[in-house]
Image (cartoon, helix red, strand yellow):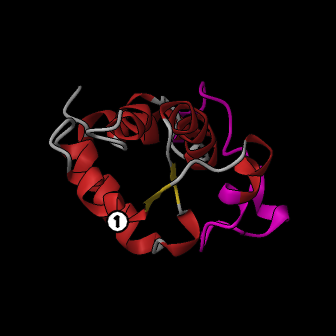
Amino acid sequence: MAAKPVEVMGYLAYGHPFLDGNGRTIMVVHAVLAQRAGFSIDWAKTDKSAYLLALTKELAKPGKGLLDDYLKPFVVEPVAYERMADTVIEVPGLAGGLKDANVVLGKTSQPEVQARYQQQKISRGAT
């Protein structure tokens, strides 16, 4: 993980089966793995748009280091375990409104939800 500190995050993002809502969870899982590997990401200094652009490129070409290229300048000494959740909460642009935090779009049996999942599969090249 030291050579490509964020590649794991790209694979977690690529592998999650949901349309939306797992960004913070992936950041927390990555924060724990990174801390165990001896580093952290200073998320407070990142830019949401630039991060999402780098993540999108990583998802299109997994394992090419595109997300690492963006986040390597933000690699810092590991954050204390007790502070890890705070570092994710401090990510610019992720605060959101609590009323919007847990929106369920519907059941996977509903045609409109199935269509969104189908579009996700198509965009990932897995029809």
Q: Main secondary structure of the magenta part?
A: loop
Please name the amino acid that badge 1 sits on.
Answer: Pro
Which quarter shows the C terminus? top left
Specify the quadrant of the image occupied by residue 113: top right
Nearer to the camera, 52 or 9: 9
Nearer to the camera, 39 or 123: 39
Judge left or right: residue 76 versus residue 54.
right
Tell me what residue is drawn at x 34 percent, y 37 percent: 2
- Residue that carries the numbered disc 1 in the rendered image: 73
Tell me what residue is drawn at x 71 percent, y 68 percent: 95
Q: Is residue 103 visible?
A: no
**Which contiguous range is marked in magenta?**
87-112
Which quarter shows the N terminus? top left
Q: Is residue 98 magenta?
A: yes
Nearer to the camera, 45 or 17: 45
Number of numbered discs overlaid on the protein picture: 1
Tell me what residue is drawn at x 61 percent, y 66 percent: 91
